[in-house]
Amino acid sequence: MIKTVDLTKKYGESFAIKAIELDLAEGDLFGFIGPNGAGKTTTMRIIATLLEPSWGEAYVCGNSVHTKPKEIRRLVGYMPDFFGVYDDMTVVEYLQFFASAYRINGEARRKRVDEMLEVVDLDFKRDAFANTLSRGQTQRLGLARTLLHDPQVLLLDEPLSGLDPRARIEMRNLLRRLGQMGKTIIVSSHILPELADICNKVGIIDRGVLNVNADVEEVKRRVRQHIVLVIHPEQITDLEKMESLLVGHEKVQGVERGDSSLRVILKPGVQQFSDLPTMLIQNDIALNQFSEEELDLEAAFMALTKGTSQRM
Ligand SMILES: Nc1ncnc2c1ncn2[C@@H]1O[C@H](COP(=O)(O)OP(=O)(O)OP(=O)(O)O)[C@@H](O)[C@H]1O
């Protein structure tokens, strides 16, 4: 559905994106994660044929951005991170206006606009002026506009940014539904955890380079294989004794020593570990803290995919 090969954009001497390789199939929901200026918008604008690459290729359904831009525009719906709505138009008029631009007219237009209002759950605001909508509602209106010509591919630039928690949940559910409808979606964000549980693939881009390009389930499965414990003894002098008790234990794969604690990586599949604190206490070690390390999804993605030639 979407494929990029060595996709690169340079401004003067600096690279906005460098050799980006994506390969997304029908129904893929790809979370495109990176900080400000990382290159997400540049990549999406090139795929949407709104910007030319310096070199490299991007294909949508086999059509190259170089030779088949018109075909691609028919297949792609692009929602920029910020878009204006017209002050003097109601929600319905706004969508009708853009439907006309796609040459959807008459009864078909009325039907299509109603369907889209239904999909993004904005029917109750159909006669409100577009500029009176909340940020979340405005984003949903933008999405409805993007969906009007029934594109197979959606490129959504930061659709969750600026939303309050409830609007965020609604937008995430909407993205999930669109994925289930078989659309291929690229959705960008600064924050990995907010996308990781709705996407099936994740890419992490930084300074134009795609450092991670991974299958979410695969990463989560591999992360979940190892429980990591953090153990703080009351006496720092006990660290060495603790370490020697834990190294070589049948449930322990490895032990890392910190200044005042141990990080204990359990063997794959080990889920029960209540015997470990018991064993330490029986060996006269008083514990301040014994807890399971919180999963830092971002770090996990980075760690697990490092050195795996980008792909998992
Ligand atoms: N027209 C331009 N001229 C020069 N540099 C540009 C231009 N457009 C983008 N850049 C640079 O390219 C890099 C990538 O920008 P891009 O907008 O793709 O990042 P982004 O990941 O979408 O960030 P954000 O989340 O802030 O939108 C940035 O360093 C940016 O300054």
Image: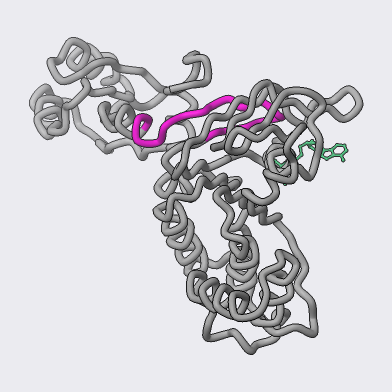
Q: Is residue 35 visible?
A: yes
In the image, what residue occupies the spot 73% across and 35% down? 65
- Residue 113 percent across, percent down from the top left: 59, 75
On-image quarter of the N terminus? top right
Q: Nearer the viewer, residue 64 or 19?
A: 64
**How many numbered dots are placed on residues in this image?**
0
Q: Is residue 232 visible?
A: no
When the figure is inspected, residue 289 is found, relative to residue 119, above or below; the finding is above
Q: Is residue 303 magenta?
A: no
When the figure is inspected, residue 123 is found, relative to residue 51, above or below; the finding is below
Q: Is residue 212 magenta?
A: yes
* Image quarter where ligand 1 lies: top right
Q: Decide if residue 2 is on the left or right side of residue 11.
A: left
- Residue 33 percent across, percent down from the top left: 58, 40
In the image, what residue occupies the spot 58% across and 68% down? 140
Q: Nearer the viewer, residue 104 or 167?
A: 104
In the image, what residue occupies the spot 46% across and 37% down? 201
In the image, what residue occupies the spot 24% across and 16% down? 253
Magenta portion: prevailing SS class:
strand
Q: Decide if residue 307 is on the left or right side of residue 280.
A: right
Q: Nearer the viewer, residue 94 or 101?
A: 101
On-image quarter of the C terminus? top left
- Residue 268 percent across, percent down from the top left: 22, 22
- Residue 133 percent across, percent down from the top left: 65, 79
Residue stretch rendered in magenta on the structure: 203-219
Q: Decide if residue 191 is on the left or right side of residue 133.
A: left
Q: Residue furthest right?
A: 12
When the figure is inspected, residue 64 is found, relative to residue 145, above or below; the finding is above
